[in-house]
Image (cartoon, rainbow, N blue to C red):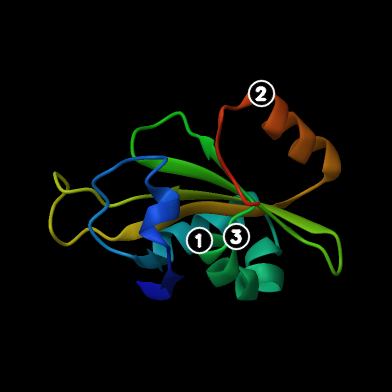
Amino acid sequence: MQFVGRIDREIYRCVTEDITTDEVIITEERIQHIQDHHPNDYERFVHHMAEIVADPDYILEANKPNTAVILKEFEENGEKFKLILRLKVERDPKEYRNSIISFWYIGETTWKKALKNKKILYKRE
């Protein structure tokens, strides 16, 4: 398990009210998942993860409870990312943390499709 960064719980309250920690981690199993399904994205872009969770551009509704789909664009180079974050809530086992489920680089078409087809819970002003 690796510490990634911290979230602003106020921002993420749009997903669920009872978030119990601001710490975000990623497990070795999830790193392997990203490496298997999105080759080279983890190695090339891992340095962006902390900023993505700390300062999302959009938080979209996910298909699972207590989970957020996060979109983030880095203006300086036009890189866009999608990250899935499972939030730890009060009824979860105490050893749980906010945890990155998946993460990958996306193109403009995927970005626009996500914003069109998913419910926007939060938009950075």
Tell me, yes or no, whether the two marked residues, 3 and 2, touch with CB atoms within 8 Å: no
Q: Residues under labels 2 and 1: Cα distance?
A: 28 Å
Mark 1 surroundings: few (<14), some (14-19) or many (≥20) residues within 10 A:
some
Q: Which residue is drawn at 27% across and 63% down?
A: 21
Distance in Å between CA atoms under marks 3 and 1: 5 Å
In which quarter of the view is residue 34 placed? Answer: bottom right
Residue drawn at point x = 41 percent, y = 67 percent: 28
Q: Residue 35 carries which label?
A: 3
- Callout 3 amino acid: Gln
Residue 64: image tag:
none
Mark 2: give few (<14), some (14-19) or many (20+) Cα within 10 Å: few
Q: Position of residue 50 (x, y in %)?
A: 53, 71
Q: Mark 2 points at which residue?
A: 117
* Corner quadrant of residue 4: bottom left
Residue 65 horizontal/vertical position (percent):
34, 33
CA gap, disc 3 and disc 2: 26 Å
Tell me the SS state at disc 1: helix
Q: Nearer the viewer, mark 2 or mark 1?
A: 2
Q: Looking at the image, do the residues carrying marks 3 and 1 touch, with CB atoms under 8 Å apart? A: yes
Q: In the rendered image of this protein, does residue 20 appear above or below residue 66? A: below
Q: Name the residue under label 1.
A: 32
Amino acid under disc 1 = Gln
Q: Quadrant of the N terminus?
A: bottom left
Single out the residue that lies furthest toward the front: 125
